[in-house]
Image (cartoon, rainbow, N blue to C red):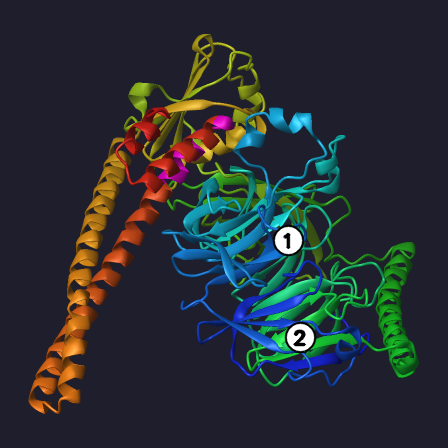
Amino acid sequence: MPPKTDNFVMRPVFQLQLNAKLMEGLATIGRFDGSTPSLVCATSTQQVLVHTSGDQEVMQSRKASLSSSPIRTLSFGKNPTAITAGRISNGPDGVDALYFGASTSLTAYNVQKNTEYFYKKVEDGVHAVVCGSVKGPRDVAGGADRGKNQNAEDPPWVIVGGNCVINGFDGNGDEVLSTVTGGQVTALMLMPWAKAKGKSAAAARGKVKSLVAASENFELRVFDGEEAITSIMTAERVHQLLYSGTPGRFAYLSDNGTIGVYNKNERVWRAKGKHRPVSAAFCDVDFDGVQELVVGWSNGLVEVRDGAEKRGVMFKETFSAPVSSVLADDYRQNGQPLPIICTVDGVVRGIQQTRAEEGVVVTRKKETVRLDTLLEERQALTVELECIEEQLARWQLGETDATLPQAGTSVQYHMRPNAESGKLDLVFKLEQAQEDTIVHGCVLQSEALFPGKEDAFFTQDEPSSSLTCALTVPRGVDILVSASVIVGSMNAVNYQIHELGFTIPSCCMFQLWEGGKSEREFPDPVGGVTLELPESFDFSQLENWLKKTFELSGGASVGTSSDFSLSFVDMQDRSGLVISGRPSNHELSIRANSMDTCCVIVESLAKSTVTEASARCDFPEELRELQDSIDRVEEFDLVRQKLSNDMAEVATSVKPLLIHAEDSRLMSDITSMRRYYAQLYDLDKELIAENMKRCNNYNELKAALKQVNAFIMKAGKLRIGQAKTNLIADCRDCVRTGDMRPLINLTRTGKR
């Protein structure tokens, strides 16, 4: 049953005309004087407009206009890529700073004094920015200083997402946090991942939050400081994340038109539209204490959705221009936060639910909608009751529907890697069924298995009591699958639908090789990683992990308390995987041909069994690729410096030529003036050509740095706990200082 819409009516309570074209997603609200809210919007002309809320009487008027609340214009001379407002550690209490992100820089700006707090070059780019308190290296180290004053609040940092990198800066612009992601960061969000526990005042207030980052590889990664604690795979690129106000619960907006809500790793609901969701915000629009999700779309549609999706779309209206941003704030300063809708034509509207005296018709409409819904539910239940009564009457008379499966029929499933096709065969089989009962088909639902369409129907030509679904399984992720299996006789008119839910493990395509080493069908792996586990670690725990991860038979005994070695074959590419342990040396060895395979195994181990492990690794082919990437970075950096020097030399000739040309004009020496301007024209062409070379060099340098960051992320995944955090920090220091020679040794041993 489709959700009902227009459960109540909302109307604009104020409207502002900014007279500028606004950019999508680049708007925020800050209190730059410590109390009065100001709306900040980025324009397509490299300018930022700052509108400060007027007095209460003016903002409560629907006719509030530009004349009643003036606008300030800030020009940073660069195209904005991300903006936000938030506190700064070395600024006045309660006063927000404006953070302006450009392609390669970040500016913290004091709007009131029209000065900079700091300016920071960010070579990895600024694609997303958020401000707040997160766990830093000092917290990871043990927090001895924090123990002296537990009531002290953590200073706010500005967190920047770039090209495979996330950086954090303090109020002076010094880097205090650095970690890597799997792709270019597209969205950042700070939120408490779990409810606060303990006696710490900061923990109780939820001051220190977890960082959630979305990247172009369709992954949402949750960080506790610099350490990734969990990840969520999505079907499409996510460009906005929103904290709902409840720990662990957040909304997301995707480029493919999907919006939804997650409660930690579990998706609560989702909906897909024909257009692209541009921006959204949580706001209690009906003042019932529950946050609703206000979504703005690229076609100008604005929706108010129930955060729990129980009431569906509660209100919608389409404006004449596409939505650029959706915000929520007490902009009128009367204690009632309102949704603020910005459209690309420069119009800003604050909308509010109709008042009680204006809502008599609305109340009647809500009651009518509720009555219609109840009538439809009653009709559906009546039809269902009639069917049950008919079947009961037939059963009492001894008549049965021969086409229906008998009572007790069930559907079981098992997974079987297929060596010939390189796919995973998901087999559904009937149990306790009659001979003529068959599986007619199956509908599988999974975002990861079927990106773009999210479900698929499987059937077979020959009738059978089993059905095999051949699936192409992505590597390294646990996949949630919902199955609807259609069961009935060959000539059935009515069918049984068996609903099943299960998880496909990340290592499902690895099959245990039970033959001897001499009988292996695959060569010995050329690479591997050796984990150095703590002395207190109990190796007997590995047996349950191996059985669960690789779907080993329950009766098989691995015997991990003593030295052991297990061989697996990857059915996708017929490569080998060897896992061996030496409890006496506290070492666990994982050998494979690629770092990616070992990363999957180590991450699976970290989720359930091991909390801390350093590592030594050697992957000859991939380390050669890393060395090639490092060489390219150094080469491109030298070329960049040379191009910059050449452009500087050419630019020094521009001013003298301009002076000579102007002198010639004043002396009416037209011939000399033309000659000087001709030389200036040639210099301009030379500068443009040099600038094109510099742009191409920058793109090549950025691509090489992206590959280096990808290797750093892989090297981090081969470690667990603090060893992982330290390795990533050391590698990022090498990249930041320009000395990348230690990266190879850091990847191999974790030490410089």
Asked if residue 607 lies left or right of residue 686, the reply is right
Q: Residues within 10 Å of mark 2 (few under 14, many from 20)?
A: many
Rendered residue at 62%/75% (across/down): 342
**In front here: 298 or 422?**
298
Q: Is residue 515 magenta?
A: no
Residue mark closest to the camera, 1 vs 2 = 2
* Residue 739 lies in quadrant: top left
Position above or below: 372 against 121: below
Observer able to see residue 429: no
First in sequence, mark 1 or 2: give its number: 2
Asked if residue 387 lies left or right of residue 544, the reply is right
For marks 1 and 2, give the CA distance. 38 Å
Residue 420: % across, % down: 37, 43
Secondary element under disc 1, as helix, strand or loop, is: strand
**In front here: 2 or 529?**
529
Secondary element under disc 2, as helix, strand or loop, is: strand
* Magenta region: 711-722
The disc placed on residue 686 is none
Q: Which residue is mark 2?
A: 302
**In front here: 246 or 90?**
90
Q: Quadrant of the C terminus?
A: top left
What type of secondary structure mainly makes up the magenta span?
A: helix
Rendered residue at 40%/67% (across/down): 78
Observer able to see residue 682: yes
* Residue 657 lies in quadrant: bottom left
Q: Quadrant of the N terminus?
A: bottom right
Amino acid carrying label 1: it is Val
The disc placed on residue 485 is 1
Q: Residues within 10 Å of mark 1 (few under 14, many from 20)?
A: many
